[in-house]
Amino acid sequence: MAKQPVNPGAEPSIESADETKARLAGPSARKGQPTPSRRVQEAANKRPLVPDDRKLAAKQARAKSAEAREKARLGMAAGDDKYLPVRERGPQKRFARDYIDARFNVGEFMIPVMFLVILLTFFPDPSVQTYGILALWAFFLVAIGDCIVLGFRLTKKIEAKFGADRAEKVRWYAAMRALQLRVMRLPKPQVKRGQYPA
């Protein structure tokens, strides 16, 4: 038994010869030109493995590499996790950095104090040199005590904010950052003095 058309009342669509030619040529074919074969299209898309001008290619590669390095440097200075080393990543490390940068740390003045003591050693008076060395040792003790206090306070704040079971150990990390001059820290401080994180 022959199948009946779905819509018997509709007129059959007949395509003219020009319409068939235009459909087969496709949108990429140019008017008045034959459609390029597959081999011709692949040959047009091929690129040489070794560029013709090696000096230009090397210059472009160096420029691209320099741009990527500059982008990574700016990202690290801004504290973007994408460009930070693994030990610097995460919300807890960001919280620790912001807390340290907002705080007045005794240890960040270690380099200026050491430089001052070195200058004092050039004085011919031995008592001046002795007092300078004693002052340096006293400063070391105060800085270490300040780092210990910082570690305890920061650990409590991180445990309160992120939970005691998920808190990371940040005491050593905090001490190393607190002993650096503010302008020399990486990532760069993102908060002002006294602007403690919530």
Image: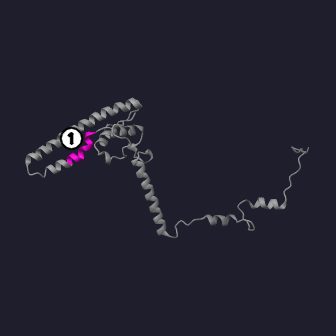
- In the rendered structure, the answer to whether residue 197 lies left or right of residue 1 reads left
Q: How many marks?
A: 1
In this picture, which residue range is highlighted in magenta? 105-114
Residue under the point 33% across and 34% down:
154
Residue 84 in magenta stretch: no
Residue 128 vertical placement versus 168 (above, below): below
Q: Which quarter of the picture shows residue 38?
A: bottom right
- The residue where tag 1 is placed is 140
Residue 71 vertical placement versus 49 (above, below): above
Query: SS of the residue at dot 1?
Result: helix
Residue 187 vertical placement versus 35 (above, below): above
Work out whether residue 164 can be spotted. Answer: no
Quadrant in the picture for the C terminus: top left
Quadrant in the picture for the N terminus: top right
Residue under the point 34% across and 40% down:
101
- In the rendered structure, the answer to whether residue 68 lies left or right of residue 15 reads left
Where is residue 59 drawn, in percent x and y?
A: 46, 65
Residue under the point 81% across and 59% down:
19
Residue under the point 14% across and 49% down:
120
Of residues 149 and 164, the one nearer the viewer is 149
Work out whether residue 94 can be spotted. Answer: yes
Where is residue 158 drawn, in percent x and y?
A: 37, 33
Residue projecting furthest to the bottom: 52
- Residue type at the position of mark 1: Phe
Q: Which quarter of the picture shows residue 100?
A: top left
Where is residue 145 drawn, in percent x and y?
A: 24, 35
Residue 11 vertical placement versus 91 (above, below): below
Where is residue 75 drawn, in percent x and y?
A: 43, 49
- Magenta stretch, main secondary structure, is helix
Residue 111 in magenta stretch: yes
